[in-house]
Image (spheres, rainbow, N blue to C red):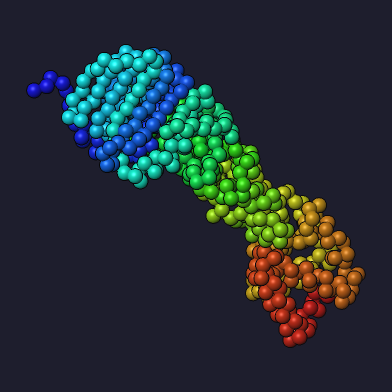
Amino acid sequence: MSDSWFTVNRIGLRKIVQHRPALSAIAELVSNAWDEASANVVVTIDPTNVRGQFRFKVVDDNPTGFVEIEHAFTLFAESSKKDIPEKRGRFNLGEKLVLALCIEAEIVTTTAHVRFLSNGKRTMGRKRTVTGSEVSGIFRLTREQIAELDATVDTLLPPMGILTTYNGRAIASRSPLVSFEVVLPTIVADEEGVLRERKRKTQVDLYEPLPGEEATLYELGIPVVTTGDRFHVDIRQKVPLNAERDNVKAAYLKRVRTAVLNATFTRLSTEDVASAWVKEALSDPEVAQDAVRTIVRSLYGENVVTADPGDQEANARAAAAGMRVLWSGAFSKDQWVNVREAQVAPSTGKVFPTFHPLSGGPDSPVVPTVDPSAYTIGMYYVTGLAQMLAQRLLGIEISTTIVRSHEKFGACYSPGQLILNAKRLRPEFFDPSAGWTGLHRARVLSLLLHELAHHLAVNHLSDEYYEALSSLGGKLAVLALEEPTIFETHSV
């Protein structure tokens, strides 16, 4: 019986990782070479004489080669990279995942040579390299997998200064479209060597996806997961990955998307700003206010306002003025928080306020009222006429108040209360010397009907309000025909 705690079943490990794309195996080896002082990395894959078997080789020119050859076949040995955020390794696991896929394999470096035989044994050999390392092996691959590898190997993002070739052709290094710095979580070993997540400032490079490519999240040039967003996003430090090393947490991706939006909002098209990743970033507390303003205006135009649920007339006025009125369903709760903080869509109630004197609210103005003891005869007549019409046309009792306000309103109505502004209506409106001529009477009745119609509909621009005016006008005509003397008590 072995005295080791663990025994690793190579076949079982192979079954666990066999579903991964062929590119992931090559990427594991290439990323190791990129982490070292390599100037050239050469990858070749060729068919063997056995159907369905392909030989791969990854060669680098790192002067020192493998520092410790035992790390190539020891699971979870202490990694020299796990305390360096800018290097890809952390678990000393990559080569083992590749070896698990191999029928046989070989590693030759400057100081050692190890062979992994098809019978599951391992032997040490005498070969040495002058510089760098050579990792080779035999995979079982289908033609479809090889075709997929050929099609996806160019999605790797080799670092500038490291020439990386695949079957004789260079994998092109790309120039970032945008680079910026942002604080993101990463995985770094503490003083005791324990891997812990912490946040640090890192560089993020954005690339334009080439035709046929789907936007992808990268870790130091190695693809992690496709996102379908606008850009390839290369995080220039270790990324907190899942156990399969092929995805990230939703919260991490959201933080990345927000950082990308903050860096690119001036570059996005109308189609881009309507995409899911932008909408997600728009709900993040870290989204920049300039980004929010640009996105909202791109979606809805420059003349955009927020609907005021307490002032339907202001909403209607804004729409009539050609402004885009945003209702609650336009954004999520978190998005609305950012939209309001960015002050990009003021409330219709602020842009087109409906004046409500004597409302008693915290923002209602102080309006001087006229004491009824100071009413003129004409004021008594007009207020009495208003109360009579409210009772006969609407069947309600109302109170009337006369004020002297510099605000731009002649009269206003709230349920059960009519306010007349003597400053705006001027003395002649209440002047009995006018003799209640036809024009004067028409002016008074027009104003009173206009205000009483608000008992049935608040919004001037609504169909309901015009129907209320028509109804009251018809009732007034019938009243005048049936009881022509009713107005005599209110005439001069």
Q: Quadrant of residue 67?
A: top left
Question: Left or right: 278 with respect to 222?
Answer: right
Rendered residue at 79%/72% (across/down): 445
Query: Can residue 344 be seen?
Result: yes
Q: Is residue 47 above or below residue 115?
A: below
Rendered residue at 69%/56% (across/down): 323
Q: Residue furthest left?
A: 1
Q: Quadrant of residue 123?
A: top left
Question: Which image quarter is the N terminus in?
Answer: top left
Q: How many marks?
A: 0
Question: Left or right: 112 with respect to 221?
Answer: left
Q: Quadrant of residue 88?
A: top left
Q: Nearer the viewer, residue 257 or 474?
A: 257
Question: Which image quarter is the C terminus in?
Answer: bottom right
Rendered residue at 86%/72% (across/down): 440
Q: Residue furthest bottom?
A: 482
Q: Is residue 37 above or below residue 236?
A: above
